[in-house]
Amino acid sequence: MANIELDGANKKIKVDSGDLTFDVPGDIILDADGADLVFADGGTNILKITNSSSDVVLQPQVDAKDIIFKQYDGTEVAKIDDDGSFKVANSTLGISQSSSDVIIKPLTDAKDIIFQQYDGTAVATVEDNGTLNIPASKLAIGGTAVTSTAAELNILDGVTATAAEINLIDGGTARGTTAIADGDGVLINDAGTMRQTTVETLKTYIGGAGLVQTGRTIISSDTAGIYLDDIFSTTYTNYIVLIRNMTPVSDEDDFRFRVNVSGTQKSTSEYIYMTEFLDTGGGSQGHESSASDTEIKLAHDVDNESWKGGYNAIMHVSTHLSDASNRAAFVMSGTASYIGDSGIGYVSHFGGNYADSDRAAVTGLDFYYNSGSIARGEITCYGVTIV
């Protein structure tokens, strides 16, 4: 029989051999006011259980050692590793911390993390290749089931549109004032498939003659001339030029123009023109013409009174391209009306061409008054589409 010694001086219960069993009809309560329960083996502290503000702290007392949980048969089911991670099922799953982030990962290569319902049905799998696999019937956002297929969701792959751009298709009431020009895109529903085309294609399909503005200048103060460059191109062979309220600074001035080739005004003696005038006040007629001039004269004696409206005309340009055989680089005609000397009204018809010796295509027009500047006026050029 083992001896049990109560060592009051050292506050110990000593047994000289075997185990010590506490067998009581009630509970065994260990009450330590020092807040620590320490388990030792042969005088070496192994584990301490501490009360920390009513939190229970389990702390190994030997450095670099783990806390291991096992089944009855000794199979390890979980481990609190010395590196701070929690490892489950014989180190197959690790839960650790990195810069306050929680990391959950398999500890065996080529294994997945599977989330299951109580009955074992998989609801999500984090596969070894990094893919999150959720069955279609299990995916919900905000409590609402997502019924889209993978193929339907993949349609979003590569979409770079902003929310504002997508909302434009949503039938909003907002309207913009963006100018339309050649090269702009238009969204078309092609038998259920949304496609983009250009405004040129659309206006060709609509048919008929269409006007596309290629240049515009408005003068409201004294200006030496109006220069419209880059208004002609190979896009159109017919153009309409509208001249409105072209009022001179000097009274009774002559209105004229020259062509422009790539930014250079052509003043060589290669203009041919004829202008017929009808004096609506006296009923007399007159004309000006030249077979070789440095400019084309459209009107003479235009009054500078603003209320008289200045010079107004519509000009049709039927060709502006170079012609290696005939040198006919520019051909035009038109009609005009204006108030001249002593308030007499004039109407006129004019026509002419410019035959460039180097056969360069005309790109623009330069308008001016002979002896002074332009006080006010507006010139707009349109390319004409004929289908």
Image (spheres, rainbow, N blue to C red):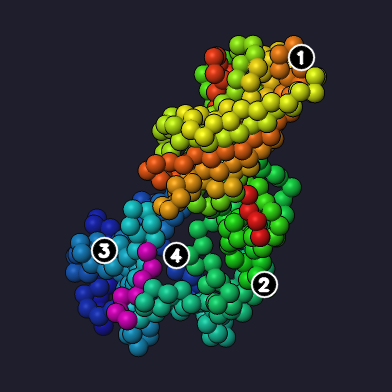
Q: Amino acid at mark 4?
A: Ile
The residue pinned by badge 4 equals 29
Indicate which label's residue lies in the foreground, 2 or 4. Answer: 2
Q: Mark 3: which secondary structure?
A: loop
Q: Residue shown at 66%/60% (left/top)?
A: 387
Q: Residue shown at 43%/41% (left/top)?
A: 356
The residue pinned by badge 1 equals 343
Could you tell me if the residues under marks 3 and 1 are in contact, i.e. CB atoms within 8 Å? Answer: no
Indicate which label's residue lies in the foreground, 2 or 3. Answer: 2
Q: Mark 2: which secondary structure?
A: loop
Q: Amino acid at mark 1?
A: Gly
Q: Which residues are magenta?
A: 103-110
Note whether 249 is above or below 147 in the view shown. Answer: above
Indicate which label's residue lies in the foreground, 1 or 4. Answer: 1
The residue pinned by badge 3 equals 83
| Neighbourhood count class around disc 3 (C-alpha, 10 Å): few under 14, some 14–19, many 20 upward | few
| Neighbourhood count class around disc 2 (C-alpha, 10 Å): few under 14, some 14–19, many 20 upward | few
Residue 199: where, in percent of width, then height? 61, 55
Q: How far apart in space, not on screen, are marks 3 and 1 (Cα)?
A: 104 Å
Q: Is residue 326 left or right of residue 146?
A: left
Q: Residue shown at 58%/27% (left/top)?
A: 297
Q: How far apart in space, not on screen, are marks 4 and 3 (Cα)?
A: 33 Å
Residue 374 magenta = no
Q: Amino acid at mark 3?
A: Asp
**Residue 213: quadrant of the picture:** top right
- How many numbered marks, from 0 up? 4
Residue 140: where, in percent of width, then height? 62, 70
Q: Is residue 166 left or right of residue 37?
A: right
Mark sitting on residue 192: 2
Q: Is residue 339 left or right of residue 133?
A: right
